[in-house]
Amino acid sequence: MPQEASQREAYGRTLVELGRSSPDIVVLDADLCKSTMTGMFAAEFPGRAFDVGIAEQNMVGVAAGMAASGKVPFASTFAVFLPGRCFDQVRMAVAQPRLNVKLVVTHGGISVGEDGPSHQAIEDLSLACSLPGFTVIAPADAVETVQAVKAAAAQTGPFYIRLGRPKLPVVCPEDYQFKVGKAALMRRGNDATIIASGIMVAGALEAADLLAKENIGCRVLNMATLKPIDESAVISAAEETGAIVTAEEHLEHGGLGSIVARVLVKNLPVPMELISMDDRYGQSGKPAELLQRYGLTAKDIAQAVRTVIKRKH
Amino acid sequence: MPSSDTSKSASAGIVKAGAFSSADKSGSPSLEEMKELARHLRRHIVTIIGKAGSGHPGGSLSAVEILSTLYFKVMCHNPAEPRWPDRDRFILSKGHAAPALYAVLAECGYFPIAELETLRKIDSRLQGHADRNATPGVEMSAGSLGQGLSFGIGVALAGRLSAKDYHVYVMLGDGECDEGQVWEAAMAAAHYKLDSITAIVDNNGLQIDGCNCDVMNLEPLPEKWRAFDWHVIETDGHDFTQLLNAFTAAKKIKGQPSVIIAHTIKGKGVSFMENNVDFHGKAPTAAEVEKALKELA
Ligand SMILES: Cc1ncc(C[n+]2csc(CCOP(=O)(O)OP(=O)(O)O)c2C)c(N)n1
Ligand SMILES: [Mg+2]
C-alpha cells in the first residue's frame, strides 16, 4: 500500500510557506478554516487572513477587490459552496475581469462520505471549467497539491483547485514536476489509455496493475489540469493506444470525460468509456462504500478498459 | 395533540411515543414529561452520532427544547401522513442539526426509533443532513446554510394562495444568519406581511471557527430583525414554559412575521460539549458517549 497524505494539510502548509516569501498573499475563509486547513496560515499571519463568516458570495467579492488592488487572495471553502453557492460572483467578479483570484476548495467528490449529498461536490468542476479564462486543477495527491498551489501563486489569473477530504495515496514520485496544462504520464502502455484526475488516479494505477496480469498494457495519464486541457497528450493517446477510458469523481456532464471527448471528436475519434458519477446524486456512507456503490473503483475502471478494447475492432 | 383547531382533520393528532405515555389524559405531555422527553432526545443524539462516527452534536443538542416544543406542544401534524396538506410545517434550515430532528420525528412516530441507529450509513433514510426525499417528516433538504427561510416564504405564500391556515416554522442557526440570503428572505417575508411564518434563531453564540462575535459579529441581532420589520421575541431556548409562551405569542401577531431569538447553549446537557466549539462537527468517541449518557441518565 502506498503511503497516504492529506491534500488539505498540504494546502495549508504550502500557504504558510508562500506567505513567508510573498507578503501579498492573503487568505479568505467562510467559517471553515479548520476544515480547509487555511487556519494554519491564519495562525502565522493573522493580519492577512480574513474569515468573512458563513458568506461565500461576500468572500468571492472581497477576494476580487483585493486582487484588483495588488493582493494575491486565496479563498477557500467546501467545493459544494464554491463555485456553486456563488457562481455569479465568480463569473462577474473574477472570471470576466480576469482577476488574480485563487479559489482552492476542499471536500470535492463523493469521498466526502457521511455528510451526504448536500456536501458531495460533483458538479463543481463542470461549473469551474465553464468559465472562460479559468485554470482548473484537480490534483491527484498531496505532492501534486503542493506544486499546483505554488503554480497558481506564481501565475497571474484565476485558478480553481479542487482537493479531497480523506487522506489519499501518494501516487506522484518524489521527483515529480507538475506543469499547469500538462498531463503526467504515470504508466506506459499501448493497448488503451486511462485518463484520470484527482482521487481516481490511484484507482487508475491499480486498474492498470490488474490489467497487466491479463497482458493488457494500459497507459495511465494523470490529467490534473482540466482546463486548459492537454490536447496533445489526449491526441497521442488516441493515436498510439486507440482507446480511452476517463475516470473522475464527478458527474459525467462537463467534467474530465466530457472534456476529453470534445478533444477526441475534434481531432481523432476513438472508442471511449467514461467512469464517473453519471447523472445522479450520492448519499451518506463511508467513502470506500460510496466509491464502490457508484462504480468508481479500480475494478470498474479495469472493466471499462476491457470493454473499450473490444470496441477497437 | 397539540392544536385544538377543529377546522383541521381530526386524525391529525400526533402519535406519542410509548416511552412518554401521559398522565394527563388530554394527550398533551406535561412539563415533567417534556423534560423527560428532552433527556431521551439528547441520549438519542449523542448515541447515534457516536455510532455514526461523524456528525454535529453541538447544534443538535442546543435545539432539543425548541424542536420538542414544536412537535409535541405547538404544531398540528400527523406522523401517519407526513405530507398531510393541512399540516403545520417545520423547516430545518440549519440542516446539520438533522440528528435532533430525526430523534424528534422518531419519538413522534414518523419512523421506528430503532432506525435512528442507521444515521449516516449507506442506504439509510437518515442522511447526514436533512433530506426531503429520504426521510418521512422532513420538509426540505438542507445542509447548505441560509436557504430555509426563502423556502418557508414559498410555503407560506402558497398556503395563502390556497386559503390554508397552516403555520410555517423555520429554524436557523445564529452563524447561519451571516448568509445574505437570510436577509433577502427576511425582507421579503415582512414585505409580504407573512404572519404565518415564525422563524427561530438557535442563538447558541457559536459557529465553526469560533464564537459569532469573533468570526462575524451579528449583534445587535434583535435590532436587525426589528429593522427588517419582524416582530421579535427573545426567550430562553431551553425553558419549555418560555418557549411555549413565545410560540403562542408569535402566532397571535398579525400583519408581520415573527422571529423567536432563542438563547441556547451549544452542546446543552453534556458538560464537556457545552459551549465547546470543538463539538460543533465532531462525533464523541465511545468513551465520551458513555460519559455523556451517564450525565443524561
Ligand atoms: C453555505 C454553507 N457554508 C458553510 C457551511 C459549513 N457549516 C456547517 S455548520 C456551520 C456553522 C453553523 O453555525 P450556526 O448556524 O451557528 O449553527 P449551530 O451553532 O446551531 O450549529 C458551517 C459554517 C454550510 N453548511 N453551508
Ligand atoms: Mg450557532
Image: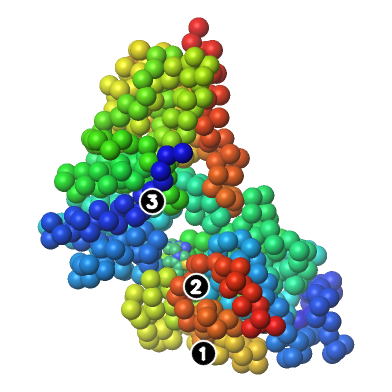
Which element type, helix, strand or loop, lies under badge 3? loop
Q: From this view, report whether residue A165 is shown above or below residue A209.
A: below
Could you tell me if residue B264 is visible in this image? yes
Q: Chain of mark 2?
A: B
The picture quadrant where one finds residue B86 is bottom right
CA–CA distance in space, label 2 to label 3: 22 Å
Q: Nearer the viewer, residue A130 or B115?
A: B115
Q: Which mark is residue A6?
A: 3
**Most distant residue in the top direction:** A313
| Image quadrant occupied by the C terminus of chain B | bottom right
Q: Chain of mark 3?
A: A
Which element type, helix, strand or loop, lies under badge 2? helix
Q: Which mark is residue B162?
A: none
Q: Which residue is mark 1?
A: B234
Say if mark 3 contacts mark 1, CB within 8 Å: no
Could you tell me if residue B231 is visible in this image? no
Which element type, helix, strand or loop, lies under badge 1? strand
CA–CA distance in space, label 3 to label 1: 44 Å
Q: Residue A255: x, y in percent?
A: 41, 36
Q: Which residue is mark 2?
A: B279
Q: Residue A66: x, y in percent?
A: 18, 61
Q: From this view, report whether residue A271 is shown above or below residue B149.
A: above
**Label 1 CB less than 8 angstroms from ligand 2:** no
